[in-house]
């Protein structure tokens, strides 16, 4: 198995886990999974899914809980600017 395919599978797994944690109300664990995925994602579909989940979770957060989602979104932005 190629390294890229293995990474893509890990990212997909992290996205699924983040969705599951969000559904069960465990926002901190969901953010951790999305941060892991954001640090590794190169595929545009993964980046879009991560951004969508983080933005949605951020919009539903209290003021003090938004920082973890902001970190995920900032990671995506930093990686996008580094690749440009």
Image (cartoon, rainbow, N blue to C red):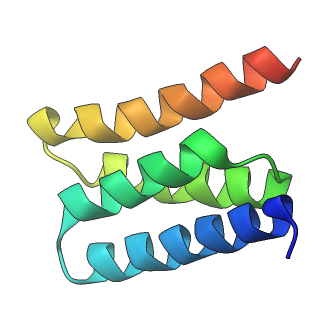
> In which quadrant of the rendered view does residue 70 lie?
top left
On the question of residue 55 being in view, the answer is no
> Percent from the top left, x then y, of residue 61?
21, 49
Residue drawn at the location 87% of the way across and 67% of the way down? 2
Left or right relative to 40: residue 72: left
- Residue 69, above or below 22: above
> Where the C terminus falls, by quadrant?
top right
63 vs 73, nearest the viewer: 73
Residue drawn at the location 50% of the way across and 79% of the way down? 16
> Percent from the top left, x then y, of residue 57?
35, 56
As drawn, the residue found furthest toward the front would be 1
> Percent from the top left, x then y, of residue 69?
35, 41
- Residue 75, above or below 33: above
- Residue 16, above or below 54: below
> In which quadrant of the rendered view does residue 37 lie?
bottom right
- Residue 75, above or below 84: below
> Where the N terminus falls, by quadrant?
bottom right
Residue drawn at the location 69% of the way across and 26% of the way down? 79
Residue drawn at the location 58% of the way across and 55% of the way down? 50
Q: How many marks?
A: 0
On the question of residue 30 being in view, the answer is yes
41 vs 56, nearest the viewer: 41
Left or right relative to 23: residue 71: right
Left or right relative to 1: residue 66: left
């Amino acid at each position: 198995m190629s390294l890229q395919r293995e990474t893509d599978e890990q990212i997909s797994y992290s996205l699924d886990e983040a969705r599951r944690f969000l559904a069960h109300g465990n926002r901190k664990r969901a953010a951790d999974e999305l941060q892991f995925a954001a640090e590794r994602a190169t595929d545009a579909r993964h980046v879009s899914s991560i951004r969508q989940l983080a933005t949605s979770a951020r919009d539903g957060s209290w003021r003090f809980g938004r920082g973890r989602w902001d970190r995920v979104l900032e990671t995506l932005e930093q990686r996008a600017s580094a690749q440009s």
